[in-house]
Image (cartoon, rainbow, N blue to C red):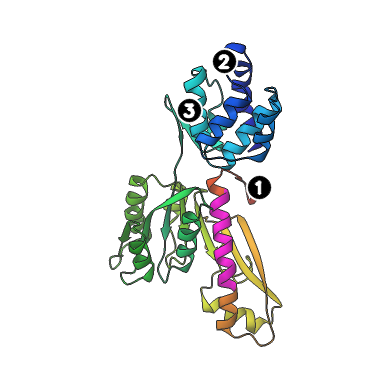
Amino acid sequence: MQDELKNLADLYYTRVIEPSAGININWIRRTMLQLGIKDESIDNLYMINAPMSREVWYYAFVKAFEEKKLADFLNMLVDTIGSLPLGNLESSLDALGIYYDGKYHAKVFNIAVLVSGRGTNLQALIDAIDEGKINGRIVAVISNRKNAKALVRAEKHGIERFYVPAKKGESRESYDKKLAKIIDVKKVNLIVLAGFLRILSPWFVERYKNKIINIHPSLLPAFAGLYGDEVHRAVLEYGCKVTGCTVHYVDSEPDHGPVLIQKCVPVNDDDTVQKLAMRVLEKEHECLVEAAKMIAEGRVEVRGRKVILKK
């Protein structure tokens, strides 16, 4: 995010250093305190009445961004000096998770989770959002199974839930169009498959290209096409020394799309399917949270089969 922050800070810098602007280190400290941001460096700069250098100004932007208060900081700045033309900074604002409609607002990154079972990976996402690790919200939990425990988890946390059954003989595309109606109404930015026991149609995958991720309990491409305990049993029977999990983008082939994150788990000599599954599941939770966080922050770029993770 460094380039985007610098672009935005530079837009205002030539204006705030004008004597008539009324922006100085005192203004920065007072504004930060009003936003609930306490910072020792800013306090020290205030004590020595430091000049408004570009470095000090950029540091204020970094702190506001890190504390998820950048939109509020910008609005307080505009209230002081007035608005300025944004020019070609729309892409920078978008990368920073902000939009402008006369006022600055933090974008809400909307996530839909498709799941068929217990929903432990769903719970990991819920917890991470509640703890402020992911700047987003889950706007829909969708299941093809009426009794999926994941729907109970969603209800407990006040998340809208949807049971979407498949009719007998219904095509994949016909079923997926029912999912798409929910996803489009909810303005979903990311679709997470967390143990969703259906293969998505090419129509759905193309409609939401590079917006669908899946968690798989192996180090893909190893043991692709298997599910749950089948994967861990195959790992043990093959005699693997290392296994793990993969978060990947979804394409038209099952367990095939570009790899986003992988985490390894050693295979012990005394492992059972259940023991191994539990250790891999812990890494699945970590992997999925990290992936959703990076995507929500705009730090992921897909180039063919290669996924570039930005700092």
Magenta region, residue range? 280-294
Question: Which residue lies under the disc numbered 2?
Answer: 21
Question: Which residue lies under the disc numbered 1?
Answer: 308
Name the mark on residue 75: 3
**Quarter of the figure with the C terminus:** top right
Bin the neighbour count of mark 2 within 10 Å (Cα to Cα): few under 14, some 14-19, many 20 and up.
few
Would residue 36 appear left or right of 183 to someone viewing this image? right
1 or 2: mark nearer the eye: 2
The foreground one among 136 and 262 is 136
The foreground one among 90 and 70 is 70
1 or 3: mark nearer the eye: 3
In this picture, is 231 found above or below 154? Answer: below
In this picture, is 212 found above or below 115? Answer: above
Bin the neighbour count of mark 1 within 10 Å (Cα to Cα): few under 14, some 14-19, many 20 and up.
few
- Residue 248 percent across, percent down from the top left: 57, 58
Q: Which three-letter amino acid code belongs to the residue tagged 1?
A: Ile
Q: On the image, which quarter does residue 161 sit in?
A: bottom left
